[in-house]
Amino acid sequence: MRAWFSRIGAGQPAQAVGQGAWVQPLGAEHATSVDLQMMEQALAQAREAGARGEVPVGAVVYITQTGQVVAQAGNTREATQRATGHAEIDALEAASRALGTWRLDACTLVVTLEPCAMCAGALVQARIGRVVFGAMDPKAGFVGSLGNVLCDERLNHRVRAIGGVRGAESGELLREFFRARRK
Ligand SMILES: [Zn+2]
């Protein structure tokens, strides 16, 4: 656990473009000012999750064209004892309920930590339009660190993603949480 979280946010992949943002091969674009606002909200969700004793990760789903927030969530794995209680899964499910569709291609998901294999898979299944994330997760991340589920060219849906957006802050939140738990 210690080694994992001391490494979070470190070791960004080589394709660094612009202000610390890592742009996937398919996503030759930078975080927009709306993305940054949404990351602020995702960080607030992460802090709330941490205060509830959950791993502090937060996510927001918004409509890409309008900037309207559709759903937000923090991790709920401890409270609900669901292995799938990651912020991204809860945010996707809430967004689908709100919009009445599983297909979220009009939406952007913003999350404080690089999605794991499960969440990246769910994002592909939801046909999410874009993904913006914070810290890299060298131990479990599947959007660049250990693999890249979002832009595997064998899949019929590929997702544009931008990583490293306020990554230092997201990573610090996680490190602080685990430091406090070890005391
Ligand atoms: Zn996950």
Image: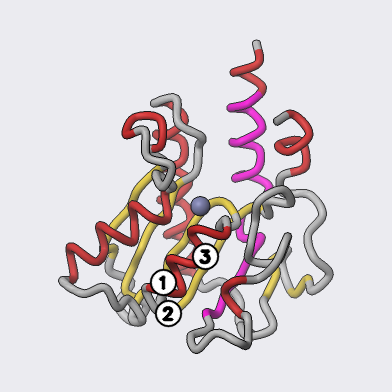
Q: How many numbered circles are shown?
A: 3
Q: What residue sits 79% from the left and 65% below the top? A: 13
- The disc placed on residue 16 is none
Residues under numbered marks 3 and 1 in contact, where contact means CB atoms less than 8 Å apart: no
| Residue range of the region highlighted in magenta in the rendering | 159-178
Q: Is residue 14 above or below residue 154?
A: above
| Rendering coords of residue 75 (x, y %) | 42, 41
Some atom of ligand 1 lies within 8 Å of the CB belonging to the residue at label 3: yes
Q: Amino acid at mark 3?
A: Ala
Helix or strand or loop: what does disc 3 sit on? Answer: helix
Residue type at numbered disc 1: Thr
Residue under label 3, please give it. Answer: 120
The residues bearing labels 1 and 2 have C-alpha atoms spaced at a distance of 6 Å
Vertical order, 86 against 48 (above or below)? below
Compute the Cα span from label 3 to label 2: 13 Å
Counting residues from the start of the chain, the first of labels 3 and 2 encountered is: 3
> Is the residue under label 2 in contact with that under label 3 (CB below 8 Å)?
no
Q: Compare residues 129 and 64 and report the one nearer the observer.
A: 129
Within 10 Å of disc 2 (Cα), the crowding (few <14, some 14-19, many 20+) is: many
Mark drawn on residue 108: 1
Front residue of 133/145: it is 145
Image position of 17 with respect to 170: above or below: below
Density class for disc 1 (Cα within 10 Å; few <14, some 14-19, many ≥20) is many
Q: Are marks 1 and 2 in contact (CB under 8 Å)?
A: yes
Q: Residue at x 31, y 74 (%)?
A: 63
What main secondary structure does the magenta stretch of the protein show? Answer: helix
Q: In the rendered view, does 73 fall on the left or right side of 46?
A: left
- Could you say whether the residue bearing mark 1 is in a helix, strand or loop? strand
Q: Which residue is mark 2?
A: 129
Q: Position of residue 18 (x, y in %)?
A: 73, 73
